[in-house]
Image (spheres, rainbow, N blue to C red):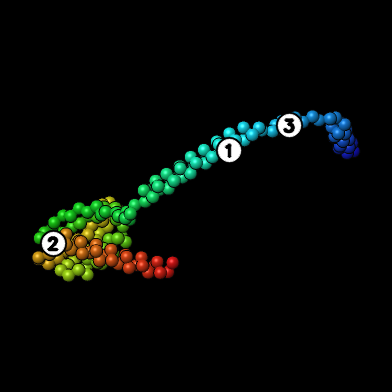
Amino acid sequence: MAKKKIKKESEEELEDDIGDLEEEEVEIELPKITKKSPKDEKELEETFSITTELEEEEEEEDLEFELEKKPEFPDYKYLDLKIYEVTENNYEIEIIGQSHGFCNILVKHLLNIEGVNIAAYKMTGLEPPKIYLSFKNGHKIKDILHKGIESLREEVLEVKKHFQKLM
């Protein structure tokens, strides 16, 4: 029973407090608004027009700057190669920073080149991937690598065209 009386008393106190607030007058101060003279309006318009002109000039400069940033040609990643001649017409090539995917497809393209006897790669986690090449006499390593990379580039461009058709 005691609990019920406490609840009733607290509710009655709240009602009394609310009643007290209703009886009191609350004064609110609002900011004073004054009319601006025509001079103030002209100055405001002038500053607004100056700032918009400056912003437009900055936007034009930004557009020019953005156009200058974009390269005309795509960014190419150059291969970091180290070529070692093991014996005559047998080479070991380290390709730093490449994965199984790149080495595998490069070896496939190298095997399709006339004059290449053996093309294989080995990749471990301890050292960079290595491609082993063996070719017939009369061929140069630079020519064979160049032909292999060019055939790989042609295949990539062909695949790119097919994907663009799908999009």
Q: Residues within 10 Å of mark 2 (few under 14, many from 20)?
A: few
Foreground pick, 33 / 6: 33
Q: Is residue 29 above or below residue 1?
A: above
Query: What residue did someone put label 1 on?
Result: 45
Query: What residue did someone put label 3 on?
Result: 30
* Three-letter residue code for mark 3: Leu
- Earlier residue among tags 2 and 3: 3
Q: CA distance from mark 1 to mark 3?
A: 27 Å
Tell me whether circle 2 and circle 1 mark residues in contact (CB < 8 Å).
Answer: no
Query: What residue did someone put label 2 on?
Result: 140
* Identity of the residue drawn at 13% across and 56% down: 85
Residue 144 location (% of width, % of height): 18, 63
Which of discs 1 and 3 lies nearer the camera? The answer is 1
| Residue 2 seen | no
Q: Is residue 108 left or right of residue 38?
A: left
Foreground pick, 118 / 81: 81
Which of discs 2 and 1 lies nearer the camera? The answer is 1
* Three-letter residue code for mark 2: Lys
Q: Residues within 10 Å of mark 1 (few under 14, many from 20)?
A: few
- Choose top left, top right, bottom left or bottom right for residue 160: bottom left
What element does badge 3 sit on?
Answer: loop
What element does badge 2 sit on?
Answer: loop
Q: Residues within 10 Å of mark 3 (few under 14, many from 20)?
A: few
* Identity of the residue drawn at 37% across and 51% down: 70
| Residue 4 seen | yes
- Choose top left, top right, bottom left or bottom right for residue 147: bottom left
Q: CA distance from mark 2 to mark 3?
A: 90 Å
